[in-house]
Image (cartoon, grey):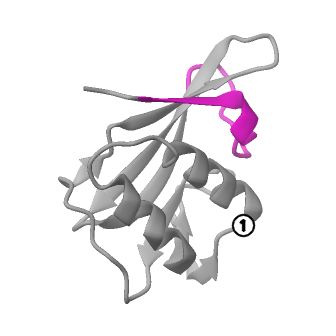
Amino acid sequence: MAAVEHPPRHLQAAESGVLEKVLSVQFPGAEQLRQQLPQTRVVGRWGSDSPSVDLEVVEPFPRAEVPDGVIPAIGAVKDSSGELVGELLLWVSDGCLSALEYSWYTDEAPVVLPDPHDVTVAVEQ
């Protein structure tokens, strides 16, 4: 999905913070995905100003027994007034973290990830 590829780099604090937040709830495979975080690298951005990124997990790591696609934990993002402004989606491929997507509901696309304190995570059934 990367529109702007670059050499793999470690997660930045904002990326780690929202990944940890989204993975803080329980669902099948969550523990294995949490264990992948120290080995997770960013390998591309979805656009030059996009906070959404493609991820790669460096071996060795435990693979999660989850289907490919978006995990069932969704991070709802609210602004300071409590209005829902977007959501965080975490993508998995072949049992490993593959992308962090920040989709938005506002007219202006976000250029930074939200503060984890502004994110409420729920598991979809």
x and y, in percent, of residue 57 in the image: 43, 77
* Image mark count: 1
Query: Looking at the image, which residue is at 37% across and 89% down?
Result: 60
Magenta includes 48? no
Query: Looking at the image, which residue is at 32% across and 43% down?
Result: 27
Q: Quarter of the image holding residue 81?
A: top right
Q: Nearer the viewer, residue 49 or 69?
A: 69
Return the residue at label 1. Answer: 12
**Magenta extent:** 104-122
x and y, in percent, of residue 79 in the image: 75, 20
x and y, in percent, of residue 25 in the image: 46, 41
Residue 111 at least partly seen: yes
Query: Looking at the image, which residue is at 75% across and 62% down?
Result: 13
Q: Nearer the viewer, residue 67 or 109?
A: 67
x and y, in percent, of residue 62 in the image: 32, 76
Q: Is residue 11 above or below residue 86?
A: below
Local crowd size for mark 1, using a 10 Å CA cut-off: few (<14), some (14–19), many (≥20): few
Q: Nearer the viewer, residue 111 or 19?
A: 19
What is the residue that sits farthest to the right in this orientation? 80
Where is the N terminus found, in terms of image quarters? bottom left
Please tell me whether mark 1 sits on a helix, a strand or a loop.
loop
Q: Going by the image, does 76 lie left or right of 110?
A: left
Where is the C terminus found, in terms of image quarters? top left
Q: Going by the image, does 49 lie left or right of 92?
A: right
Q: Going by the image, does 16 lie left or right of 89?
A: right
Q: Quarter of the image holding residue 48?
A: bottom right
Q: Is residue 89 above or below residue 77?
A: below
